[in-house]
């Protein structure tokens, strides 16, 4: 067996560290990326997707000259994983926004218990349907291309080996969570308005005719109204959601004021 000189091994390993650093950021993001990071996707497939994204992104970025010290490599590993986790959290919040919007819509239209455990997370059928439709729409519109561009752009925003400051990262995280809930409530607004009108009308009828069991008469009406709003409003809901998702791909930092 031929033993290689230590100098040759060091030279062979030097180009692999930047590729490994890229893989760390990519794999942290892919683990919860919409469509590619779902629970139903096997771990080996996620690993293959991460390697494929790494091979695409690695030639496009500026490589970092690393010293072989343990502290430098450890800091690089921690920084890249932190950035990848932050970016994947921002993307995953868009899926949670669809689930939250579906939950709000189902609660408003008395459909929250219908097939409530169909997904891996216990969400109502409306939330599950909107999530599947939204993820499918994102894939059809080129989610993999946008994700690759997003990862390449992330190295301009967060250079390799340079960790973001804690105040900026915490402010950005709070802003993304707030935006997610605003988006979820905006998507569910038609269902909330319909529920408000229904309950007001039910109260007026109950006051005018106390002997009538208005709940039995009104329950089919609100169920039909909820299903009709879902059928008629799903294209608009998914269009607004996809626009917000791809706007985040283009500008993940957003307005930091």
Image (tube, grey):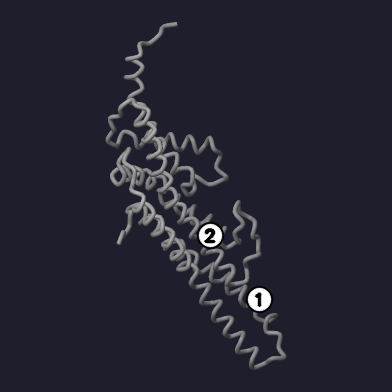
The image's mark for residue 48 is none
- 172 vs 69, nearest the viewer: 69
- 243 vs 24, nearest the viewer: 24
**x, y percentage for residue 29?**
43, 44
Q: Nearer the viewer, mark 1 or mark 2?
A: 2
| Residue 29 visible in rendering | yes
Left or right of 193 in this view: 76: left
Image quarter hosting the C terminus: bottom left
Residue tagged by mark 2?
99
**x, y percentage for residue 163?**
34, 43
Neighbor class of circle 2 (other Cα within 10 Å; few <14, some 14-19, many 20+) is many
Q: Looking at the picture, does residue 58 appear above or below residue 170?
A: above
At 45% from the left and 68% from the top, the residue drawn is 186
At 32% from the left and 38% from the top, the residue drawn is 160
At 31% from the left and 59% from the top, the residue drawn is 256
At 45% from the left and 6% from the top, the residue drawn is 1
**Mark 1 or mark 2, which has the lower sequence index?**
2
Q: Secondary structure at mark 1?
A: helix
Residue tagged by mark 1?
220
């Amino acid at each position: 067996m031929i033993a290689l000189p230590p100098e040759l091994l060091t030279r062979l390993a030097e180009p692999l560290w930047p590729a490994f650093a890229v893989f760390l950021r990519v794999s942290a993001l892919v683990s919860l990326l919409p469509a590619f990071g779902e629970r139903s996707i096997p771990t080996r497939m996620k690993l293959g997707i991460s390697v494929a994204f790494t091979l695409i992104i690695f030639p496009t970025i500026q490589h970092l000259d690393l010293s072989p010290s343990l502290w430098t490599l450890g800091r690089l590993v921690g920084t890249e994983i932190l950035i990848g986790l932050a970016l994947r959290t921002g993307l995953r919040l868009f899926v949670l926004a669809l689930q939250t919007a579906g939950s709000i819509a189902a609660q408003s239209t008395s459909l929250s218990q219908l097939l409530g455990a169909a997904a891996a997370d216990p969400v109502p059928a409306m939330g599950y349907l909107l999530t599947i439709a939204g993820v499918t729409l994102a894939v059809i519109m080129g989610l993999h291309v946008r994700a690759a561009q997003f990862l390449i752009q992330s190295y301009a925003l967060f250079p390799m080996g340079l960790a973001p400051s804690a105040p900026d990262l915490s402010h950005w995280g709070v802003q993304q969570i707030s935006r997610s809930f605003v988006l979820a409530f905006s998507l569910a607004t038609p269902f909330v308005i319909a529920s408000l009108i229904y309950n007001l009308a039910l109260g007026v009828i109950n006051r005018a005719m106390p002997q009538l069991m208005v709940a039995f008469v009104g329950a089919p009406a609100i169920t039909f109204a909820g299903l009709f709003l879902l059928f008629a409003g799903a294209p608009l809901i998914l269009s607004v959601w996809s626009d917000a998702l791809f706007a985040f791909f283009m500008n993940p930092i957003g307005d930091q004021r």
